[in-house]
C-alpha cells in the first residue's frame, strides 16, 4: 500500500504571534493543512493518509478534518519530538496496522499545500525503483558555502546543486531499519529523512518538484500563497 504521511508537528515560530500553529492558519476558505490533505486524498496512487500532529492538537485536527474533508482513509496520530521522530511515528503506525513489507510512505510538509498530483505519482513510482526519493528543484542562484559564516569556503558547481522540497518517500520497513541502525551521533546531525540514506551511502532517487511547491513559514509566504490560490481559482472559473 501507498500512504501519504503529512508532517504537521511544527509550531510555526517564524510566522510571528498567532493563536494557531502555521499549518492551521486559513488559506482562502480552508486551513492550510486541509488543502494539503486533500491533494493526497484525491491521488489515485495513495491508499490512506496519516496526519501526524502534536498531542495537544489531535482533537483540533480531528475537528477540522471532520468539517472540511471527512474520509475513512484519514488517520490522525501523535507526531514526534523532531521531524524524523514524526516520520518514525508514522512508519510505526503503518507497520502496526498494515503489515506489508512493500508499504511506501510519501512524507510531505503540511504547509506545502500546492503539491501536484504529478509530484505525488512520481514519488511513488521512483520509490519503487530506488527505495527512497527526494523532491527537488534545480538551484537558480549560485550556492556559496562558508564554514565559519564570515568568508567563502567553497562555491559548488551550480548545475549540480538542487533545492530540497517535499515529498520525501521511502519503503517503510527499509527506512525504519536504516534509521534504527544509525548511531546517536548520526541521528543528531540529521536535517531530514533523506539524509538517513545519504549517511548510509544508499541511493535516493530525485523527483523534479515545482517552484510553486512552496513551504509557508512566514507571513510573507502566507500572503504569496493567498495570491497563488486566487490565481488558481480564477483559472478554474
Image (cartoon, rainbow, N blue to C red):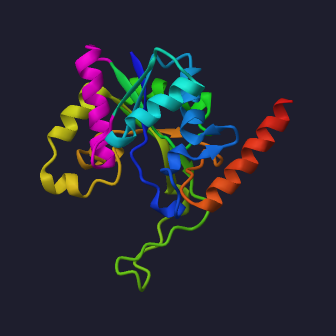
Location of residue 159 by image quarter: bottom right
Q: Identify which residue, 63 or 155, lies in the foreground.
A: 63
The C terminus lies in which quarter of the figure? top right
Q: Identify which residue, 90 or 195, lies in the foreground.
A: 90
Q: What residue is rendered at 42% in x and 20% in y?
A: 2
Q: Identify which residue, 58 or 131, lies in the foreground.
A: 58
Q: Is residue 27 left or right of residue 128?
A: right
Residue 30, percent from left and from top: 64, 37
The N terminus lies in which quarter of the figure? top left
Q: Is residue 23 left or right of residue 179?
A: right
Q: How many marks?
A: 0
The reply to whether residue 107 is visible in this rendering is no
Q: Is residue 59 left or right of residue 84?
A: right
Residue 114, percent from left and from top: 62, 39
The reply to whether residue 33 is visible in this rendering is yes
Residue 164, percent from left and from top: 48, 50
- 196 part of magenta stretch: no
Q: Main secondary structure of the magenta part?
A: helix
Residue 167, percent from left and from top: 47, 38
- 89 part of magenta stretch: yes
Bounds of the magenta span? 78-102
Residue 86 versus residue 137 in the image, above or below: above
Q: What residue is rendered at 41% in x and 50% in y?
A: 10
Q: Is residue 212 left or right of residue 154?
A: right
Q: What residue is rendered at 82% in x and 30% in y?
A: 236
Location of residue 231 by image quarter: top right
Amino acid at each position: 500500500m501507498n500512504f501519504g504521511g503529512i508532517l504537521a508537528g511544527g509550531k510555526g515560530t517564524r510566522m510571528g504571534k498567532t493563536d494557531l500553529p502555521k499549518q492551521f492558519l486559513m488559506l482562502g476558505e480552508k486551513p492550510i493543512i486541509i488543502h494539503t490533505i486533500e491533494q493526497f486524498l484525491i491521488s489515485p496512487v495513495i491508499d490512506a493518509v496519516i496526519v501526524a500532529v502534536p498531542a495537544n492538537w489531535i482533537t483540533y485536527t480531528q475537528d477540522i478534518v471532520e468539517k472540511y474533508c471527512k474520509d475513512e482513509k484519514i488517520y490522525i496520530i501523535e507526531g514526534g519530538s523532531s521531524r524524523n521522530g514524526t516520520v518514525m511515528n508514522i512508519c510505526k503506525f503503518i507497520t502496526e496496522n498494515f503489515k506489508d513489507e512493500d508499504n511506501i510512505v510519501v512524507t510531505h510538509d503540511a504547509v506545502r499545500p500546492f503539491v501536484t498530483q504529478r509530484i505525488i505519482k512520481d514519488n511513488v513510482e521512483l520509490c519503487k525503483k530506488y527505495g527512497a526519493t527526494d523532491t527537488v528543484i534545480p538551484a537558480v542562484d549560485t550556492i556559496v558555502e562558508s564554514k565559519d559564516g564570515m568568508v567563502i569556503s567553497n562555491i559548488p558547481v551550480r548545475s549540480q546543486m538542487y533545492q530540497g522540497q517535499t515529498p520525501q518517500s521511502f519503503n517503510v520497513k527499509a527506512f525504519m531499519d536504516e534509521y534504527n541502525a544509525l548511531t546517536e551521533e548520526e541521528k543528531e546531525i540529521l536535517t531530514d529523512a533523506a539524509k538517513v540514506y545519504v549517511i548510509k551511502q544508499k541511493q535516493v532517487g530525485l523527483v523534479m518538484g515545482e517552484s510553486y511547491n512552496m513551504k509557508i513559514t512566514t507571513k510573507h509566504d502566507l500572503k504569496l500563497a493567498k495570491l497563488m490560490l486566487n490565481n488558481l481559482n480564477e483559472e478554474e472559473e
